[in-house]
């Protein structure tokens, strides 16, 4: 409305000024109100035009006053006409504006209704989508709730089971604590007993040391006596030589006797005891089997198996294994005793003491025959073999290796001491006899042990404690059979 009033004021001003100008036609006027514009054609007033002479210099006569009055009257008429036109114009503008406002309101209402319908449609679509999503979420929540309830039930069952197990374990722990208390008590008692035994051992050790000192003194005296006896041996040897000469003369006298008497005498001089199987062979017994041997320089008799077939015969069997019926994991005394253990016709070990006394008399060959579970056989032979006495732990001495059971000897050279489960004489910080079983010259649990545990076929692989000959079958292979036998190095095989 402010803009309309301004436009009307301007229109009035223009109409007022129109008296000073000449116009032939109607003059158009345009009014802008917001987005709408209005154009009006106003009629030109006839009396508004003036002659150019009217602008001349006024005179001071009566004509001038009359003319001025006319002009004022004309201006009043013009103003009245203009006022009427303005009123009409205002009414017209108001009517036009009412129609436009009604049309604008109808358009706005229509647009607002369409917008509201569109918004409502969108809201309905979104509501349906949200309802669908809520339905899905509700289904998922129900599914998860069901699964959680099932899991809670399972957890509850597991908890009950664990509680029962915990109770059982608690009871077991209580029992173990009782057992531990009992064992601790037993350990304390054993410790006390061990202390007592240690004291007894110390006392025995002191007694043994005193005994050794006494025996050392006695041995010294015996050595002095032996020196005296040795000095007397020269006279005895001379007497012995004279006796030998006498015997030779007697033998020569007997030799000139008849053949029958000579044969009778020779039969009477033939020995009836044998020191080894070589002597048995030379006596004419050439069948392999068990014979009675006599311990050198004693009357002690020993049963031994004689091999009269291998390489000319005359072999005294020291050890034989082939079926595992005899246990070779034995004590020092069992390996030491003259008669050994086992059955001479089966699995057997000839006593270390007998072998030591037999081999110390003269040089002997040692032959070791071996066979595996695949039907193969081999042997190892030594040109010189002997065992020292018990004081030297029956130390073995070997020289001159040959054979087919390995390119080098599986028994360590120089010799090692003999060890058993109760006599640890090896060079290892461990106890080889207890680890690998049996009695043997272990050195440091070396590459051989023919007195180990006997394993049957199918169980003989990867056996560290079996019958082992490393440089033929390796450390984990347990052999099927073994034989150790000796005979004099000068054996000729004839009798």
Image: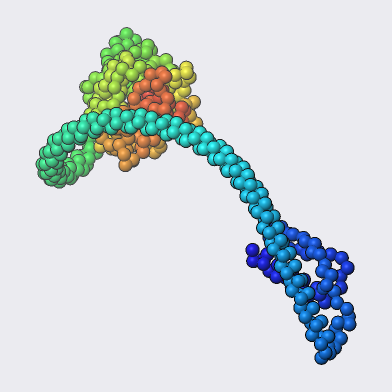
Camera-nearest residue between 269 and 149: 149
Q: Quadrant of residue 27?
A: bottom right
Image position, residue 40 (x, y; %): 77, 61
* Residue at image coords 17%, 37%: 177
* Residue at image coords 82%, 69%: 45
* Left or right of residue 172: residue 478: right
Q: What colour scheme governs how the chains and residues are painted in the rendered image of this protein?
A: rainbow
* Left or right of residue 144: residue 253: left
Residue occupying the far top of the picture: 260
Q: Is residue 213 above or below residue 245?
A: below
* Residue at image coords 13%, 41%: 188
Camera-nearest residue between 464 and 322: 464
* Left or right of residue 173: residue 415: right
Which quadrant would the N terminus be assigned to in this image? Answer: bottom right
Image position, residue 31 (x, y; %): 73, 63
Q: Quadrant of residue 221?
A: top left
Residue occupying the far bottom of the picture: 60
Q: Is residue 469 above or below residue 48?
A: above
Image position, residue 90 (x, y; %): 69, 61
Which quadrant would the C terminus be assigned to in this image? Answer: top left
Tell me if I can see residue 386 in this picture.
no
Q: Quadrant of residue 164?
A: top left
Tell me if I can see residue 72 in this picture.
yes
Camera-nearest residue between 18 and 185: 18
Q: Is residue 280 above or below residue 489?
A: above
* Left or right of residue 349: residue 224: left
Image position, residue 180 (x, y; %): 17, 37
* Residue at image coords 22%, 35%: 236
Numbered circles on residues, count: 0
């Amino acid at each position: 409305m402010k803009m309309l009033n301004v436009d009307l004021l301007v229109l009035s001003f223009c109409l007022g000024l129109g008296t000073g100008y000449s116009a032939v036609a109607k003059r158009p006027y345009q009014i802008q109100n917001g987005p709408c514009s209005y154009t009006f054609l106003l009629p030109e007033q006839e009396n508004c035009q003036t002659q150019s002479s009217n602008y001349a210099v006024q005179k001071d006569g009566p004509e001038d006053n009359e003319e001025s009055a006319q002009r004022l009257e004309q201006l009043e008429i013009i103003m009245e006409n203009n006022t009427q036109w303005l009123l009409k114009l205002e009414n017209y503008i108001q009517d036009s504006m009412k129609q436009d406002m009604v049309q604008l309101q109808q358009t706005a209402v229509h647009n607002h209704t369409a917008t509201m319908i569109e918004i409502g449609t969108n809201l309905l679509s979104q509501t349906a989508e949200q309802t669908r999503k809520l339905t899905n979420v509700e289904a998922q929540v129900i599914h998860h709730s069901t699964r959680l309830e099932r899991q809670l039930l399972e957890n509850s069952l597991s908890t009950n089971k664990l509680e029962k197990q915990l109770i059982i374990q608690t009871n077991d722990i209580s029992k173990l604590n009782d057992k531990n208390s009992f064992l601790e008590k037993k350990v304390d008692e054993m410790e006390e007993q061990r202390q007592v035994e240690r004291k007894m051992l110390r006392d025995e050790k002191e007694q043994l040391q005193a005994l050794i000192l006494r025996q050392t003194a006695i041995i010294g005296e015996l050595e002095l006596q032996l020196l005296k006896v040795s000095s007397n041996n020269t006279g005895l040897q001379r007497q012995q030589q004279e006796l030998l000469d006498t015997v030779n003369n007697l033998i020569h006298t007997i030799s000139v006797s008849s053949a029958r008497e000579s044969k009778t005498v020779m039969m009477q001089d033939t020995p009836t005891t044998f020191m080894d199987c070589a002597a048995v062979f030379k006596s004419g017994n050439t069948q392999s089997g068990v014979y009675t041997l006599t311990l050198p320089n004693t009357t002690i008799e020993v049963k031994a198996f004689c091999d009269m077939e291998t390489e000319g015969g005359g072999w005294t069997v020291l050890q034989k294994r082939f079926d595992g019926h005899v246990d070779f994991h034995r004590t020092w005394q069992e390996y030491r005793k003259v008669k050994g253990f086992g059955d001479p016709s089966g699995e057997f070990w000839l006593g270390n003491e007998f072998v030591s006394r037999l081999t110390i008399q003269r040089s002997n060959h040692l032959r070791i025959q071996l066979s595996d579970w695949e039907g193969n056989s081999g042997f190892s032979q030594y040109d010189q073999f002997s065992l020292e006495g018990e004081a030297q732990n029956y130390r073995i001495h070997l020289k001159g290796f040959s054979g087919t059971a390995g390119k080098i000897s599986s028994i360590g050279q120089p010799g090692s001491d003999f060890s058993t489960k109760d006599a640890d004489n090896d060079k290892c910080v461990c106890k080889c006899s207890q680890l690998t079983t049996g009695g043997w010259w272990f050195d440091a649990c070396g590459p051989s042990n023919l007195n180990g545990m006997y394993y049957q076929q199918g169980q003989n692989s990867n056996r560290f404690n079996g019958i082992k000959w490393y440089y033929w079958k390796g450390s984990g292979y347990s052999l099927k059979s073994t034989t150790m036998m000796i005979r004099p190095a000068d054996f000729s095989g004839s009798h």
